[in-house]
Amino acid sequence: MKDPSQRILLIFMLLGICLTTGCAYIAVGTKLAPIEPPRPSFQPRVEHTVGDFSFKLEGGAIATSKFTGRLLNYNILSSWKRRGYICDERYIESGSFSRTADYNLTLSGSQYGKSSIIMQILSGLTLTLLPYTVTTEWDIRYTVEDVKNGKNYSASVQESYESYVELFLVFTFPVATRNYRETIQRIGDHLYNELYSQGAFQQSAAAAGESPGKK
């Protein structure tokens, strides 16, 4: 993971789980198979925001829906940058797009963490020596606008993964980080592939040698 800010955000998320519930081992999601989307003819600039996105974790959330959506968006788009699908991404508050990027992207959907509250309580009483699991389910929808021609595209994926929470799983932290990153990459690949197949990321002002918003 070359981007320092991405590493910090991911570590913050995983450490948040560790500090509040022990330490977690994350298993790679199994709904989405690895794919290789077509390589784009150019790398567009993307502005992104969080729309109608909800986040719930049984037993108590450690972050808001908006923060969780922004973190999810950032991780997915960072995987796009690593894969060479885009050249840059920038978060825009409340969807106030500047109209200077090639594409505007809005995240919607949900993230839901299922877990046994009783097991969480018992685990807490044993200082997380007694393990419990959290099943995270994603329903992710992307709406993308081509700034130059106003065309809109949409894509959606569903994925889930298991987190195993227990004190001594701190030793599996590097594996958990890698597994989470692999799951995010698969999500990103499928979203990009679906959008590309509809015609997104194939034409833009950047491809025409123009800058969006300029005449």
Image (tube, helix red, strand yellow):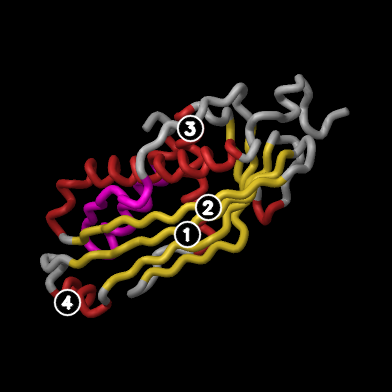
Residue wearing tag 4: 122
Q: Mark 4 touching mark 2, by CB under 8 A?
A: no
* Residue 37 marker: 3
Mark 2 vs 1, N-terminal side: 1
The local crowd at label 4, few if under 14, some if 14 to 19, many if 20 or more residues have their Cα within 10 Å, is some
Q: Magenta part of the protein: which range?
A: 8-32
- Please tell me in which quadrant of the rendered image residue 196 appears: top right
Give the Cα distance between marks 2 and 3. Answer: 15 Å
Mark 1 vs 3, N-terminal side: 3
Q: Mark 2 touching mark 1, by CB under 8 A?
A: yes
> In the visual, does 43 lie left or right of 168?
right
**Relative vertical location of residue 1 with respect to residue 171 in this rendering, above or below:** above
Q: Mark 4 touching mark 1, by CB under 8 A?
A: no
Describe the element under mark 2 as helix, strand or loop: strand
Mark 2 vs 3, N-terminal side: 3
Which residue is drawn at the image coordinates 62% and 46% (left, top)? 48
Which residue is drawn at the image coordinates 68% and 43% (left, top)? 104
Mark 4 vs 1, N-terminal side: 4
The residue at the far front in this view is 197
Give the Cα distance between marks 4 and 1. Answer: 30 Å
Describe the element under mark 3 as helix, strand or loop: loop
Which residue is drawn at the image coordinates 50% and 55% (left, top)? 140
Residue wearing tag 2: 156
Residue wearing tag 1: 139
**Relative vertical location of residue 25 with respect to residue 214 in this rendering, above or below:** below
Q: Is residue 181 visible?
A: no
Give the Cα distance between marks 1 and 3. Answer: 20 Å
